[in-house]
Amino acid sequence: MANRKLDYETCLASASKCKTRYEFKRLDKQAYRKACKMGWIETLIPHTVFKTLDYDTCYNIAKQCKTRTEFFKMDHAAYYKAMRSGWLDKWIPEYHWRETEVTFEKCKAVVDELLASGRCKRMDLKQAEPQMYRIAVREKWLEKLGLQDALTSRKQAIERRRIYTEEVIVNTAKQCPTLKYFREKYPGMYYVVSKNHWHDKIAFLEQSTGYKNGLLYDTVYVYEFPMTNVAYIGRTIDLKRRHYDHCHNDNDSIVQYAKSIGVSIPEPHILATFAIKTKGDKHGEMECKMIALYRSLGWSLLNKARGGSMGGIGFGKWTMPKLLEVAKPFKYWNDFAKAYPGLYSSICHKKLRDKFPWLKLKKTTNGFWSTMSKEDAYQYAKECSTRKEFAVKYSALSQHCSKKGWVDEWFTQNYSAPKRICQYTVDGTLIKTHSSIAAAAREAQVSSGCMCDCVKGRGRVIRNYVWAYESTAYDSINFPGQNYKPRNAKCRIHQFSMDDQLIHTYESIKSAADAIGMTAPTIRAALIGRTKTAGGFKWAYADAA
């Protein structure tokens, strides 16, 4: 903010808008600082003169309030003065109703006043007299007082569903034009209809799609690929939604075929439309005729299920009597699923399989393989080298033979037994044989990984011993021999020229390496025979023969 001329009149104009110095400071900080600097602040806004809070002043404020909360909100300074002085308990008790003063008759009188004003909920009593409400709950007076319990939204929904009888639902559905309108406006009633399977009771409602003039219309459609003479024929009550399902399902035969030949999915053509009037209508007859017609004309069809499947037109129009009538001729779910795949998937989705107790699943083990004798089963088992191959090639027979215990006789378990480890001295003398790598590692006080590296040839000696598998040929083991000396052992060594003339004797390998400027491993390699020379000299241990 740009600097402005602040004189007494300017500061007075800003201070006249405020009641306190704090407000003055918040409103115009520059004017406030100027007034404080020049000594005008006492003239502009004098210090607030607080009123004297004595007994009479606090009591006059407190008697206007019924509760301590009202007293605090009205004048918190007087409230704190009365609380510190001990006057608050005399004027306003902690609770407006003392427990000794609350009786059933007083509660009844208060409730009658609430009922007269149209307030009949328990929450109304709690808001009006909280202490009386607590005592009424503790003494169990609420039911006797006639106050209604405020139900939660879930309790209200459950309470309404109890009065949703079949008659009430039918009368309400008659006032709705379509099934979609009924489902959206009365979701609770529609939930009761679905739970009790009362769809046939409201079948007179026209659905949003497929219904015209109270009749359900079925449509037979076709997708044609004229370049390859391939087509797909189907049937639905909602062609628009069915076309969307075809186009957005990657496992659909139409989508897969269109991708394979590199073309887009064509629009469906309507072949026939007819009304479904009675239970005896053969709904799949028209679809079967169209399939036969296209095949006679040389077209190849992409249909996976046979034509005329009743499940293919949706589950919405099927009632429980119709489902029971269709499923009655079948004994097994497998046969029913092959005949009506769409209907079977809808039954599984809505969890209605318990309604068909006579339908059972076929057990594949109760067939050809389960009745086979041991001799005949062995002929198949001889073709396999392992039990895993036998289980993959003949799964049902493998399951049958496993229950009989024959598989254990024909195939041995391929458990890899631990390999035994031999412990040798550096000159090739066998000391001990260990049961496993872990046992040998415990003996040598090293890790199993270190011992494994040693027996596989990535090392030679551990703890001044040679380790090898028991199966390893003795002649193939490279023993260091008597010339082997531990790395940490100090021993005298001789330095010879190339003519085998003794040049010098050193107390250790390290001292020799420091003297000739070589590394200790290089000299050690010449000592154990890995190399012939080191640094242009020959080397040998002093105690060697």
Image (cartoon, rainbow, N blue to C red):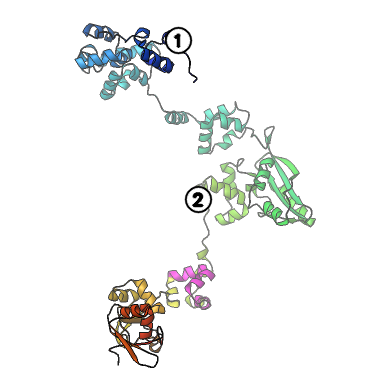
Among the 4 quarters of the image, the one containing residue 180: top right
444 falls in the magenta region = no
Secondary structure, magenta segment, majority class: helix
Count of marks, rendered view? 2
Instruction: Establish if 379 lies above or below 112.
Output: below
Q: Which label is found at residue 10?
A: 1
Residue 101 appears in the figure? no
Is 338 above or below relative to 118?
Answer: below
- Of residues 204 and 20, the one drawn nearer to the viewer in this rendering: 20
Q: Is residue 402 magenta?
A: yes
Which residue has dot 2 on it? 357
Residue 236: x percent and y percent?
Answer: 67, 44
Is 186 displayed left or right of 123 in the figure?
Answer: right
**Residue drawn 66% across the image and 36% down it:** 209
Element class at badge 2: loop
Q: Nearer the viewer, residue 131 or 488?
A: 488
User: Left or right: where does residue 335 sit relative to residue 455?
Assistant: right
- Residue 210, x across and y down, in percent: 67, 37
Q: Position of residue 30 (x, y in %)?
A: 43, 17
Image: magenta residue range: 377-403
Residue 430 can be seen, yes or no: yes
Q: Earlier in the sequence, mark 2 or mark 1?
A: 1
| Residue at image coords 35%, 85% | 527
Residue 109 tag number: none
Q: Nearer the viewer, residue 313 or 539?
A: 539
Q: Amino acid at mark 1?
A: Thr
Question: Residue flagged by tag 2: what amino acid is it?
Answer: Pro
Q: Is residue 462 depicted above or below 268 in this figure?
A: below
Element type at mark 1? helix
Q: Residues within 10 Å of mark 2 (few under 14, many from 20)?
A: few
